[in-house]
Amino acid sequence: MIHYRLAELAELTRHLGRTRQVWQRSGAKEWCQADASNPPPLEAGRSVQSAKGFFFAEQEHIFEFDGRYFRETLPKPAPFALIGVSSCDLVAIAYQDQFFASDPHYQARRQQALLVGLECTVPCEHGFCPTVDAGPAARPGTSDLVLHPVGNGWLLTVTSEQGRKSLQGLNLTTAPEAMKQQRQAQLADCERQFPDDQHIRDGVQALNAGTVNASTWQQMGVQCLSCSGCTSLCPTCSCYGVQDQSADQTITRRRFWDSCLYDGFQREASQHNPSDDAGARVYRFWYHKFSDDFRKDFGRYGCVGCGRCEATCPGVIGIHSVMKRISQHD
Amino acid sequence: MPGKQAVQTICPFCGVGCGMHLLVDDQNRVAAVSPQGDHPISRGKLCAKGWSTPFAIEPGDRIRQPLIRTDDGFRPASWDEALEVIRYGLLDILSQLGPTAVGVISSARASNEDNYAAQKFARAVLGTNNIDHCARICHSPTVAGLKQTLGSGAMTNSAADIDSAEVLVVWGADATENHAILGGHIIEAKLRGATLIVVDPRRTRLAKLADLHLQVKPGTNILLVNALLHEIFRHGWQNQDFLDSRCEGADALRKSVRDTSPTQLADAIGVPAEQIEAMARTYGQANSAMILYGMGITQFVSGTFNVMALSNLALSCGQIGRPGTGINPLRGQNNVQGACDMGCLPNVYPGYQDVADPAVRQHVSDYWQCPLPDHTGLTSMGMTQAALRGEFKGLILFGEDPVVTDPDQNEVLASLKALDLLVVAELTMTETARHAHVVLPAASFAEKNGTFTNCERRVQRIHQAIPPVGEALGDWQWLGAIARQLGSSSLDWTNSQAVFDEMAGMTPSYSGMSYEKLARQHGLQWPCDDAAPEGTPTLHQTEFPIGRARLIPVHHVDIDEPADADYPLQLTTNRLHFHYGCGSMSRKSPLLERETPDGILFISPEDARNLRLKNHSAIGIRSRRGYLETRAIITDDLPPGLVSMPYHFSEAPSNQLTNRAMDPVSKMPELKVCAVRITPLPEGQAPRTIQSIRASAAPPSARENS
Amino acid sequence: MTSLTPMVAELVDYYDDGEAARHFQFRLLDQQQWPPPEPGQFFMLSVPGAGEIPLTFTQLPDQNQHWWALVRRMGSVTSALFRLEPGAILGARGPFGRGWPRPGSDQTPVLLIAGGCGLAPLVSQAERLLEMNLGPVALIYGARSPEARVLGRERDRWQHKLALFEVIEQSPGQTARRTPLDALPDVLAHWGHEPGATFMCGPEAMMTALSQRLIERGIPPSSIWLSLERRMHCATGTCGHCYLSHRYVCQSGPTFGWPELELLMQQPVTTQTPPLLSC
Ligand SMILES: Cc1cc2nc3c(=O)[nH]c(=O)nc-3n(C[C@H](O)[C@H](O)[C@H](O)COP(=O)(O)OP(=O)(O)OC[C@H]3O[C@@H](n4cnc5c(N)ncnc54)[C@H](O)[C@@H]3O)c2cc1C
Ligand code: SF4
Ligand code: SF4
Ligand code: FES
């Protein structure tokens, strides 16, 4: 792995901006397109929305139909770089890369992206990435480049071939050993500052052991307002709905983010609904994130420890609330 | 792909006023929304409706240009042409019948700026006080009741008080479905240790989580309050200091509840006396107790008295004027508070300044530099009646769909048909717009700047994120264009800030506000004036607007239409989390639409069994006023004898059935209870929409197996 | 990559069956080819403008890529399909999912059980069994009423080749409801064989109850196969709607062996039991 010292972040942004669109987080903690010649300051921590929508779009067209032929409407984005993706979100992208490996729409976008990670030096509110092996250090194979703030500058680590190529033409000096050591120290320090996560470990164990009784899930089902907040913000949630729309002579089919917490998610035309119990739906969400069954398929849990669900759930059944409840079951 | 830019704004759906960012893509579409983490109320959360905002404002079926009615529908027209038709129409009516024959119905969904413009247009341009908006359907009894007892009809406290209250009383309000984010605060408070008491005939979500659920019979609110007061006075739990120093009428109130003990009234109320006693003990002894109420209080013939009863309860225990207390109406639409504040009511100018007061009128007339009418204005219902009598001929209406939401759809339809000129400005072709002579394309909240005032009196900025669709204009803009057609420059503002500044200059409670100041804080709560430059989270801390608060004894009023042999079930109405108002926005989301695809009726397992209904059975439902078909959903959230219908669906509008008997004070119709009869439809027969029931020649009674 | 965009297909022919069901013949246009489907697999039919639904083959595609499906009119897409006439242009993707296991080459008696339109996915399996002409085959067919029965031509054709037991849920003069579950003991007694393989399709509650009943009778769980219904929007294992535990029915199913299904159905919160027979 090659490590560089980067004095000015803007240098990198300007360089990448020559060949790609550059996206960074705005002051509102949302991903916005940045002016590469005059980029906003880079902030670490969690953005409100993860980078999910760059690849699995909130809404997109699948095809157009003109009355005789179907024309697949694959996106054709220009090459782009995401600068400042947190470690947990990098892991989430890697997770979705697996899930959507054969999805042409996802891959059309994904292949155009350069991922520049940004490691956290302090835990974020509700975050617990160390518990689920997703941070604070960027995990191998999840990025192209990784930034870590050291002193007044940055340690820039090249983590992929694409990353290496993206730096061609940029004059960089190799980072001194001390910088690398400082990164290690800062990461270790950050990790130590995370609050106690015993409730999550216990909760995951209870969930997998099947010792959480139905009424606990059902009580939480009462609290679920089916707002879709958790599934929208969770960086590994991937369900979608589809709908045909007609305009003039053209019919388009679109897909859009859906949520397994909706009562209608599995309801069939006959009104039979395999998950008509709100408690069953809440269970489903957590089973998807933390069951060993999925872990076997994906090589890791479906949760990357970002804490967004805790922050956004109006019914107080985000990660910490749920894990506390199910780890204390009778 | 996520937005190129994130534009901060306020959710357009309900009165909670959550903060969100609109994520705008490179084609100027709102691709997604994102919750605003540092917003004081929503704190990074949104409800299902908020999350579905991109669908709601999708350009798809938006009205893009003015439409003029032809013999067989509408034809697109230019703004000039449309304005011309409106001008001739209005001048015709004005010259024949004068300004009492025209009026404006504004929208609790539009911005303050739009509403200010609407009432100014009515008064200064048309010369009429015939101006109203839809608050009548929601909270007019609140205004009428609290005005008498406290002197102000708004929520006394703030959303943040939910966090500090020791006891929360949720009365006739389904907060998690209608005001979901506040509902979430209540769940959070309950989990944190607050005591939650729910009074509701239905087992609502909050009722399931509550420490105490009083599942009362519909229409027994006053009985319950009086029983609570009896118990409170008997034990000396009243706040005597507060009664002595801040209220009047305590003795009379005390006397009036001498014979209303829980034991005496338990049967009539429908809950055990012990529950009433427990509630009295909890509320009466709390350090801070907050009452939140909704349409389960207001939508009765006793609506105003119900509100006054709650006021008696809060005042007797001194649970008002401090953080974590108060009497707090949960208002429906995003800007219903603002529409009232702006004077979109026939009897008041902005800031509730009395139209009937000559000094006030003179003052406003000087400020606007035009003469003002002194006749009594008509409410929306008054306009309907006058139209049916042929005395009212021209109506300008925006952002409302009374044909779907009004309690008496048939009457509203007839009155609209009696008009010579109906102008409707809308986002999409609503049922009401279909009857217009001219339809104007209105800009959505994402397409304009302005302010909304939420239910806790917080005035917040909305920011334009995308250009208006087609030729759409903001409401104050097209109202200004009509004014200019009529030769008036009263509405010639250059931008929404100019409208706001003019409004703040004449509205005492907004006088300390400006766009800059609103941007600095996350909005400001009125009154915001010299005395309170940072706004007022808690009202009535030292004094009431009327000096001392009034305790006014109230007595039980029977519901107008109890169940009987012919109509053996009671019907109540409810709202669903997923939908909002008439559904014209929320039903555009395929996800929310999937949640409840057909209009539905909720029914208890017992009643379902008696009627041999299965879940999702097709049924006919008849009241003395109308007939609908829909599907039944069996749920033990309802007690036997009571069925419930949401009112969001134009194919099965529950207002076909509801009672038109009114609260004599506020004219609020008794929407919360009427008598109905339910008959299963033959197996395999799908429910028909109201439209096809109307179209079918066969009288529906022929199809019933009675 | 698995595309979500369908191939162009044409509605060739149709005829009505039962109360609200219709047989449709489709074909792929433009010389497109599908890999040969197995009995029990399904395809996604697009009615442009209305949406896309999963349907099973009642007759597998021939060399000319013509095939048949039986469709019950339910909601938006099926209703739109019922309004179409031959020549209409549609979209089709497939084949998807895991079909019924191939019958072995022994003389094992095979039991087929279908409820309502659940007979559709068993048709091509039955045809295959009868063609191979191995052991005895029985079919228990449950329907809500005599009028609601479907696939009359096929049942006629099978008359002398398999033992057919029809069970009508509600018929005049019959007081109690009667489902294939109620009929099972009588049928097995009458047929005189113990099934070595059972294939069934119908309402989920009916199938689980039947499976348990068969197992109680000593029939090996691994010889019982069920075809499941779930809401489906992609058939590629990505939309998530058809989830069943950590599997997606569109890919791991729709047919499951009982031992696998039993494991997948274990979850702490189960839903209310729907009626045994409704379609
Ligand atoms: C593997 C499989 C094979 C099937 N084979 C047949 C068949 O051969 N004949 C037949 O009549 N029916 C079959 N069905 C059921 C059929 O797919 C549904 O009846 C149909 O989707 C209803 O669509 P709709 O638009 O009319 O109903 P709506 O209620 O309007 O449904 C809206 C949408 O939801 C989805 N949906 C709703 N119910 C189902 C469901 N039960 N299964 C899958 N998606 C659903 C569809 O995308 C549909 O477009 C099969 C289902 C599955 C899963
Ligand atoms: S489950 Fe919650 S904490 Fe885990 S990745 Fe999803 S949103 Fe983040
Ligand atoms: S965020 Fe909470 S309330 Fe909303 S859908 Fe998820 S679990 Fe339910
Ligand atoms: S149908 Fe989409 S995952 Fe199975």
Image (cartoon, coloured by chain):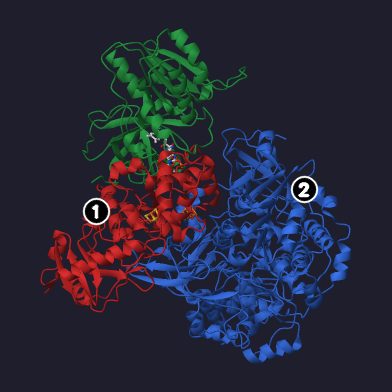
Chain colours: A red, B blue, C green
Q: Nearer the viewer, residue B392 or B473?
A: B473
Q: Chain of mark 1?
A: A
Q: Amino acid at mark 1?
A: Gln
**Residue ID at (63%, 51%):** B204
Give above or below for B634 relative to B420: above
Q: Amino acid at mark 2?
A: Gly
Image quarter for residue B682? top right
Q: Chain of mark 2?
A: B
Residue A226 is situated, as x and y percent measured from the top left of the image, at 50, 52
**Residue ID at (31%, 17%):** C129
Q: Nearer the viewer, mark 1 or mark 2?
A: 2
Residue C22 is situated, as x and y percent measured from the top left of the image, at 43, 31
Residue B25 is situated, as x and y percent measured from the top left of the image, at 34, 67
Identify residue for label 2.
Answer: B270
Q: Nearer the viewer, residue B439 or A121?
A: A121
**Residue ID at (24%, 78%):** A152
Identify residue for label 1.
Answer: A107
Image quarter for residue B183? bottom right
Give above or below for C89 relative to A48: above
SS category of the residue bearing label 2: loop
